[in-house]
Image (cartoon, grey):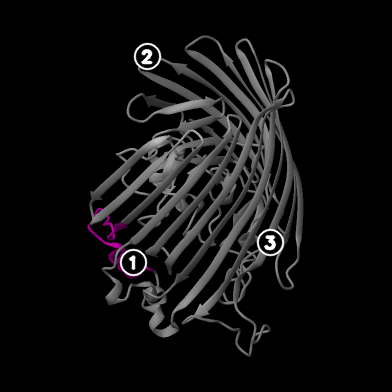
Amino acid sequence: MKKIAYLSLACAALLHAGEITLEPISVDATKISDVSGEEIKSADLAEALAKKVPGISLVRRSGIANDIILRGQKKDNISVLVDGAKVCGACPNRMDPPTSHIVTHNVESVEVIEGPYDVENFGSLSGGVYVTTAKPEEGVHGDISLNAGSWNYKKASATITGGTDMIRFLLGASYEESDQYEDGDGNTFADQVDNFIKNAANPASVAGTAYLPEYRDMKAYEKKSFMGKVFVNFTDDQELRLEYTRNESDDVLYPSSKMDAIFDDSNIYNVQYSIKNLGSFSKELSAQYFHTDVEHPMSIRYRKSSVVKGDITSALTTDVDGFKLKNVADLTDRVELTLGLDASRRNWDGLYTKNGIPMKYPPTSPKAGQTKISIPDVDTDNAALFLEVRHHFGAVEFKVGARYDDTSIKPAGNEPDNDYSAFSANIFANYSANDNLKFFGGIGKASRVPDGRELYWYSSMGVQAGTPDLDQTTNYEIDLGMENNYDSFSIKTKIFYSMLKDYIYYNADNTNAMGAAFHSFQNIGCRSRQCA
């Protein structure tokens, strides 16, 4: 089955200079350095990015923890890292997308790469969002911020940093809460669900999604965060970084879903060591280990359906362990070579509970007595080698990158394993005609493997909505553009053509005889083009 999708047909964006500063740091990336500006009250990084970057739009599902779309792509087609650490959400319905596990108060800058031009990180199919959090500073500095807004919104945050040239620390914390925001007609979340039920073709079939009377006026969410960092400079050329981030979101309401998040708790542990000037073959050698984990139970606890069914909860966890070794060397005055090794393991596990007890399949089921699972304890192991060469001469600068991935995906139980290999490569060039005019273009190829949900996910009815024999998706892309810079503004025009081979698509029409989703993910062909 092949389908052609044409995504986003807008052309030419005019970027005015002002409070929002977009600094191009390379021909294929945009760096945003004021994500936590005063005009951004919310801790939601996705909302901040949607306001700051023309190429990013927002998927709003709640008052917090919203998702992003980059160049018409979303979910696993976009790679999200925090200080080089891969962050994955635990919810198969994206209630906790990766950007929800870091708050804007902690962000120093965000680099957005559009297209398949990143060979350092696993799964960067159609782009990447790479977050850099605040760094400790010498001396003693502090910051306290208080915000308030509509619908009883409140936010408080504080940061303290200090130290010497040898050792520096940073501590930061924040708290945020909000009542349910209202739509243009003054309807709260609970009212919007009521209107959906009233206008449904069969109201009785969705009546259980209404909020119980005692929960109709509860807050939309509460969110707490903590960050701690210690940087140690053993010498001028050696640095050790120890970093920890904790995020806790409680009682997050999702009126567009049948369930709400009881909580979303995440941890990000990060250790990085770098040493510079080792010799002619190493300008900088760095090693990084990280661990991220997320716990996410979503439940019908606050809905009327719980009166009959009980407190049905889909309890999910995911964690990622990763290691990267990278060496950067100057081959000549104009040529820089980066070589690296990248490895990671992601585990994803989920089960269904009722009133806190794991649910079992009924005696009439072929799986009688077995625990109802949603994600069957899936391990995704990846190992990769990558290289990148940057060369500049005169008004021309270009980079060439390549990466080879070997990935195995192994679920628990009797589900089939999957193995994938992929070679990714790109070349991107930039020509400065003069101080005010620049031309750029590139061609690239990148791949990403299906995740545990797309391969193995089971609904609460015990039907496998995942498709265990999916192929990986590969993006072939061409980008062209030009940038005109003037005294008070700049105009950047970009056009790209992307062909996605074996695009992973959710087909809601794939159901079993009972109407439940069955092997609903499938590979299709997809093409997109855009001017921006």
Q: Which residue is mark 2?
A: 487
Q: Earlier in the sequence, mark 3 or mark 1?
A: 1
C-alpha span from label 2 to label 3:
53 Å
Question: Does residue 497 belong to the magenta stretch?
Answer: no
Q: Earlier in the sequence, mark 1 or mark 2?
A: 1
Pointers 1 and 2 in contact (CB under 8 A)?
Answer: no
**Nearer-the-camera pick, 363 or 517:** 363
Q: Which residue is located at x 42 percent, y 74 percent?
A: 300
Instruction: Nearest to the eye among marks 1 and 2: give it.
Output: 2
Disc 3 packing (10 Å; few <14; some 14–19; many ≥20): many
Question: Where is residue 193 drawn, in percent x and y?
Answer: 33, 66
Badge 2 marks a residue whose secondary structure is loop
Q: Which residue is mark 3?
A: 379
Count the labels in the image: 3
Question: Where is residue 150 drawn, in percent x and y?
Answer: 23, 52
Q: Is residue 226 left or right of residue 273?
A: left
**Segment tinted magenta in the rendering:** 177-200
Compared to residue 484, the image places residue 407 above or below, namely below
**Nearer-the-camera pick, 89 or 430:** 89
Instruction: Nearest to the eye among marks 3 and 1: give it.
Output: 3
